[in-house]
Image (spheres, helix red, strand yellow):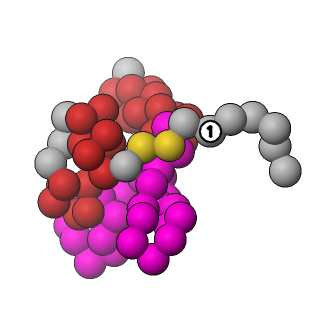
Amino acid sequence: MSNKPYVILRIKDLCEKLKLAKPTIYNLMNKNSKYFDPSFPQRIYLTSNSVVWIEEQVDAWIESKMNVAQ
């Protein structure tokens, strides 16, 4: 187990960071959506009602998108 502290993002934080709406984010994760992106960071269930994303993984996803654009 890592001693590194993780910065977690709730859906509201994720929307703000990515400047995307909730439905867009859920479409990125939905395998049946035409907007599905298998490289999008996986959500983590802390409890049955609490979902978060790891900020470092989100940042890496953003960087991968920037590298494709170049």
Task: Please count the marks in the image.
Answer: 1
Q: Residue at x 16, y 60 (%)?
A: 23
Where is 56 relative to 52, above or below? Answer: above
* Residue 61 visible, this angle: no
* Residue 8 visible, this angle: yes
> Where residue 42 sits: x, y (%)?
49, 59
Judging depth in this view, the residue of 29 and 50 nearest the camera is 50
Q: Which residue is mark 1?
A: 6
Judging depth in this view, the residue of 27 and 67 nearest the camera is 27
Where is 58 relative to 45, above or below? Answer: above
Residue 47 within the magenta-colored segment of the rendering: yes
Q: Residue at x 49, y 37 (%)?
A: 55
> Where residue 5 sits: x, y (%)?
68, 35
- Residues rendered magenta in the picture: 28-55
Q: Residue at x 29, y 59 (%)?
A: 28
Residue 66 within the magenta-colored segment of the rendering: no
Badge 1: few (under 14), some or many (20 or more) residues near its Cα, within 10 Å? few
> Where residue 48 sits: x, y (%)?
45, 77
Where is 40 relative to 30, above or below? Answer: above
Within the image, what quadrant is residue 62 found in?
A: top left
The C terminus lies in quadrant = top left
Instruction: Say which element carries label 1.
Output: loop
Disc 1 residue type (three-letter): Tyr
Q: Residue at x 30, y 32 (%)?
A: 17
Within the image, what quadrant is residue 25 found in?
A: bottom left
> Where residue 51 sits: x, y (%)?
42, 62
